[in-house]
Amino acid sequence: MNHLPSVFIHNGILTIKNESYKKEQIQEELQHLKAFRKGPYQINEVYIPSQWNSFIKWEYFIPIYKDYLKNKIKDLYKKNHLLKILDVGANNGYYSFLMYYQLKNDHLNSDFYLIDPTLDFYLQFEFLKKYFPKEDQIHWNYDRIGWQEIHLESFFDVIFCMGILYHHSDPYALLKKMHFLLKPGGVLILETITINHSDYPVCLVPEKKYAGSSGIWFIPNKKAVMNFLRRANFKEILFHNERFILDEMKQNDYLPSLEENLSKDHTATIEGYPIPYRSFFTAVK
Ligand SMILES: C[S@@+](CC[C@H](N)C(=O)[O-])C[C@H]1O[C@@H](n2cnc3c(N)ncnc32)[C@H](O)[C@@H]1O
């Protein structure tokens, strides 16, 4: 008799045991997918490496959840006994999976809405999803759209907007959209690259690339992020933590490493700009 699938974290690896699937079958399917950016995962005995060690970001998020967010979420939960959660730029679903199980552990039912326009990440999500228990899968809806295309006013209790802000040329449009989508009292979890530079609220505007990446428009310091949030009409704006991101980048042979894009002593990017940090903020509508 098959046991029900189980999901847990082991040594920072999101691990799924599902006896209905054979190793060869999993490996065959994996060959048709691009390299994973978020992870790593393990399905039965098959290890799936990833560019980022995504569990590290989660470890910075969990104290925010336990010390602050959980109480806020419980208040929101009292209204409908179902949380509607949006994950903007969900990639292959890594943080939605972890958050869904965290809430389930705390006896909070949730429906997750994952959005990301990139086909490769959607295919990875579809590949991963089927190994999870069926009763959980039905709570995850994935749309291959960008945040610009979602128009559900006052719909979500919680929005995760992680690793997105600096990739967009109009940060206000993004934050105003997050505000529009949240219910009154709903919470935004904003995580973004920041620079630890200047006592003024300032943004770095790279000429072409930042740490080797061309899709980066503004890198704010934390005071600038707080002002972005204020001017997008959020309240209860909190800065939670900031860290240098190098540890999160796993060295592997198929994707470029952040380390190659920093000076040898890690005090500047190869373009000569201040180094990247990652910071967590929360804000309420
Ligand atoms: C740096 S990754 C962040 C992934 C994940 N949220 C995290 O924190 O690790 C940025 C993600 O945003 C997605 N993306 C790009 N344009 C987007 C848009 N207009 N709306 C939503 N997501 C977008 C990319 O496909 C990618 O998965």
Image: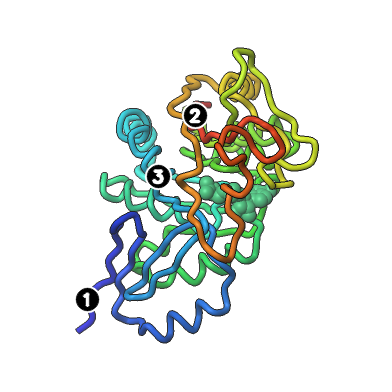
Question: Please, what is the three-letter code of the amino acid marked with disc 1?
Answer: His
| Dot label at residue 64 | none
User: Front-most of 154 and 251?
Assistant: 251
Spatial separation of the CA atoms under disc 1 and disc 2: 40 Å
Q: Looking at the picture, which amino acid does disc 2 mark?
A: Phe
Residue that lies at the very extreme toward the right in this rendered image: 207
Residue hosting label 3 = 58
> Which of the labelled discs sits on residue 281, or is there none?
2
Q: Amino acid at mark 3?
A: Trp
N-terminal-most mark, 1 or 3? 1
At a point 60% along the width and 36% down the height, the residue shown is 178
Q: How is the image coloured?
A: rainbow
Residue at disc 3, secondary structure: helix
SS at mark 1? loop
- Identify the residue position indicated by label 1 in the image: 3
Q: How many marks?
A: 3
Image spot of residue 115 (x, y percent)? 59, 53
Q: In the image, what residue occupies the spot 58% across and 35% down?
A: 276
Residue 188 shown left or right of residue 3 in the figure: right
- Tags 1 and 2 in contact by the CB under 8 Å rule? no
Q: CA distance from mark 3 to mark 2?
A: 14 Å
Task: State yes or no: discs 3 and 2 in contact (Cβ < 8 Å).
Answer: no
Vertical side of 32 occupied by 47: above or below: above
Residue furthest to the left: 1
What percent of the width, then of the height, locates residue 71? 32, 30
Q: In the rendering, at what x and y percent does residue 2 appear?
A: 23, 81
Expressed as whole percent of the image width and height from the top left, the position of residue 202 reads 67, 20
Image quadrant occupied by the N terminus? bottom left
Q: Is residue 56 above or below residue 47?
A: above
Measure how far apart labels 1 and 3 are at the Cα level.
28 Å
Is residue 141 in sight in this rendering? no
Identify the residue shown where x is 34% and y is 49%: 109
